[in-house]
Amino acid sequence: MPSRYLQMATQGRETARTNRPPVDSYYSTLGDDNLFRNAGPMPEGASEFGRPGARLPTTQQLQAKQKTPQELGDEYFQKAVNFHEQGDLVSATGYFKRAADKHNPLGMLFYGLSLRHGWGCQPNENLAFVFLQKAGEQVVPHVKDMDPAVAGMAREELAMAIYELGQSYRHGWGVSRNKKTAAYYFEVSAELGDADSQADLAACYEKGDGVKRDMKKAAHYYRLAHKQGIEMFGTSWIFKKKYESD
């Protein structure tokens, strides 16, 4: 089933790919300064802190402004999301990477997706999986205990990103194919409400791919996906009484 991330990234993607700098891999973009290396020379008399002749901040002021890695990671991730929504995929990917460097789980997830789909950088499936896996190790074990307050777009995006981990294992993108692991990630994402995951997990239960074949569970997840508008041919059987859960 096509990923909705590809649909989300359609607008402005070709422009971003045309204008992006030549980046071959994550390892050629190490260091935050590289993101702005083409910004041009600083105006004469200007300081790094603003207008020409500006007074440098004191040590106490600098210390007061220092942020924790977690705070920086959250800040970088939000900037990346803003750039992504504006269609500036090059800048978005740069900030996803900076968030990932601060061990921000969502930063790692979305930087991995950027590497996979070529959003503002050269595609790199192997490296994409590395970041998706790192994010999964931090996020997935705690998803089912997630604070109910984490909802709306953030929860939806997280579910969609975990779905991509399942796709990695299903298709062998950067990792050996593993139907059982793919089904596991589909289930985690499905429980978060992702419709694509619900449909794919249903198919796993219907065919016995990575899980024990269970037509009642298949019908259950197909119905959940159907309620969210996923159209599936040849699934009218899911509404029969004998496939209702006990």
Image (cartoon, rainbow, N blue to C red):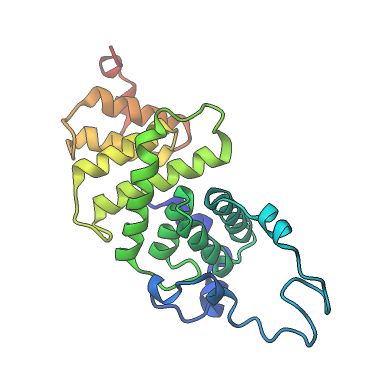
From this viewpoint, is residue 235 visible? yes
Q: Position of residue 12 (x, y in %)?
A: 58, 67
* Residue found at x 43% / y 52%: 109
* Residue found at x 41% / y 52%: 3
Q: Is residue 140 left or right of residue 181?
A: right
Q: Quadrant of residue 189?
A: top left
64 and 109: which one is in front? 64
Q: Is residue 45 left or right of residue 19?
A: right
Q: Position of residue 226 (x, y in %)?
A: 42, 32
Query: Which quadrant is home to the C terminus?
Result: top left
Q: Position of residue 57 (x, y in %)?
A: 76, 65
* Residue found at x 48% / y 66%: 119
Q: Is residue 106 left or right of residue 135?
A: right
Q: Position of residue 47 (x, y in %)?
A: 75, 78
Is 199 drawn above or below residue 130 in the view shown? above
How many numbered circles does the render carry?
A: 0
Is 182 drawn above or below residue 223 in the view shown? below
Residue extending furthest top? Answer: 246
From this viewpoint, is residue 233 visible? no
* Residue found at x 27% / y 19%: 243
Is 214 drawn above or below residue 204 in the view shown? above
78 and 43: which one is in front? 43
66 and 75: which one is in front? 66
